[in-house]
Amino acid sequence: MMKRRFSSAGLVLGPLMLLLAGCMPGAPKGRMDVAPVSFSQLPGWEGEDHTALVNMVRLECLRIAHLPAGTSLGGAVTLPYGRDMKDWKNVCVAASSVRSNRTEARQFFESWFQPYLVQQDAFYTGYYDPEVSASLTQGGEYQIPVYARPKDLLRGRDENGELEYGHWVNSVFRPYDDRATINSGSLEGKGLELAWLKSPVDLLFLQTQGSGRLRLPDGQQVFLGYDGRNGQPYVPIGRVLVKRGLMKSEDVDAQSIRDWLANNPDQVASVLEANPSYVFFRRTQRTADEGPTGGFGLPLTPQRSLAVDRRFVGYGMPVWVNISGKDAQGRFVTWSRMVFAQDTGSDIRGAARGDLFLGWGEKAARIAGDMKNHGQMMVLVPLPEAKQAGEQPVVGTATEVMAAGAGQTAR
């Protein structure tokens, strides 16, 4: 039987523990094929807003400074540095002294970071902070509950360091009730209802995105944040529709799924319950101009925050995204900029997999729904000491770079 470490969602500790779930010691690490590159090989690097990027690093440094000693940030063992809190100490000290000067900000990155190209095709999708109509009381058209996390839902890590959710059933740790069981009323009467929605489809999109904004009848907004899931496997609804022959794979996106569900109300329950995974929420305090809190514990920044698989890219890591291809209208587009690994997702798996946070509102929803792009991923690894001006990156094969992961610096 696998050994597990557990925590429960207490009134005070629950949100905090969940916030740190991805940063706990023992987080799993993977191996990925990487090779060092120079900053000149990052398309569009010269035109970036380096001053704004330094400010992002400073915020991350504040977050890292408040993590428990010994916290692992995650990341592949083939990246030679940056997986542990202490790896960021000198970088954070240097960031604190950078003036609001574009040249100095650019030099900071080129001195204190080494880019590594992930040597496989990267795949990017997008997500956003949805807004749905809701009521704090049940009645009329508001009949679909949004549930808080049950008190007996536990979070632990198995012997491989993988995060899992569930509860004890006759001394055996099992996943919590699946979607169909919850929809049948298994959580009724437990006082877990946070709000009521008009449609199970609205709930689906809240759960898929992992956060959201509830627009109440009087116009006020209530903000929700992710607070765990039931531990059941996640099955994408698009995959269900394709498997049942109800939609072609090339036609699947967020809007087409929503349209199909709207046009086939008699099949909504069957299709949605084919995904047994269920997400729970908590109310959060933030303003309308703030993004939801990501797994790293920082508010997500539109077009600057990235959800990653932490086995390969650790929290806080700057990541250079390079995408080129056609958008939903068939227009050729390129998108190259620095983002920061600040979140995770149940469907974000793999060494070169990224999910870009695109903000909130109709435009963000539309772009996120359309985004299915391939490209490149470069991970910027913090260095233990600054490179001298003009110093070149390590040169070697990916195998040699991987061997350096045993503790050598990136230089």
Image: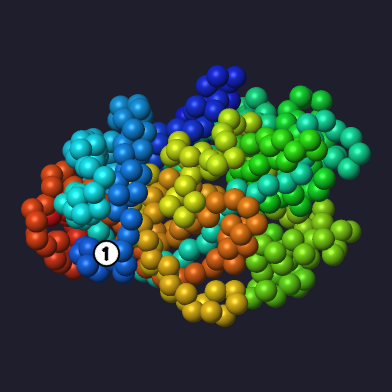
Residue located at (26% from left, 60% from top): 116
Q: Secondary structure at mark 1?
A: helix
Q: Residue at x 57, y 36 (%)?
A: 287
Residue 76 pos. (x, y %): 32, 51
For residue 57, side relative to residue 358 (left or right): left
Is residue 259 left or right of 118 when viewed as pictured? right
| Along the viewing direction, whichever of 134 and 348 lies nearer the viewer | 134
Task: Look at 54% across and 28% down and name the residue there.
Answer: 15
Report the residue marked by disc 1: 46
Q: Residue at x 74, y 49 (%)?
A: 202
Q: Position of residue 107 (x, y in %)?
A: 18, 53
Frontmost residue, 76 versus 288: 288
12 with respect to 50 (left or right):
right
Q: Residue furthest front?
A: 101
CA neighbours of label 1 inside 10 A, class few (<14), some (14 to 19), many (20+): few
The answer to which quarter of the image holds residue 263 is bottom right
Q: Amino acid at mark 1?
A: Glu
Q: Is residue 142 left or right of residue 285?
A: right
Which quarter of the image is occupied by the C terminus? Answer: bottom left
Image location (x, y in percent) of residue 281 = 64, 36
Place of residue 294 in the rendered image (x, y in percent of width and height, measured from the top left):
49, 41
- Specify whether residue 197 is in view: yes
Q: Is any atom of residue 31 visible in this view?
A: no
Image: 270 above or below 374: above
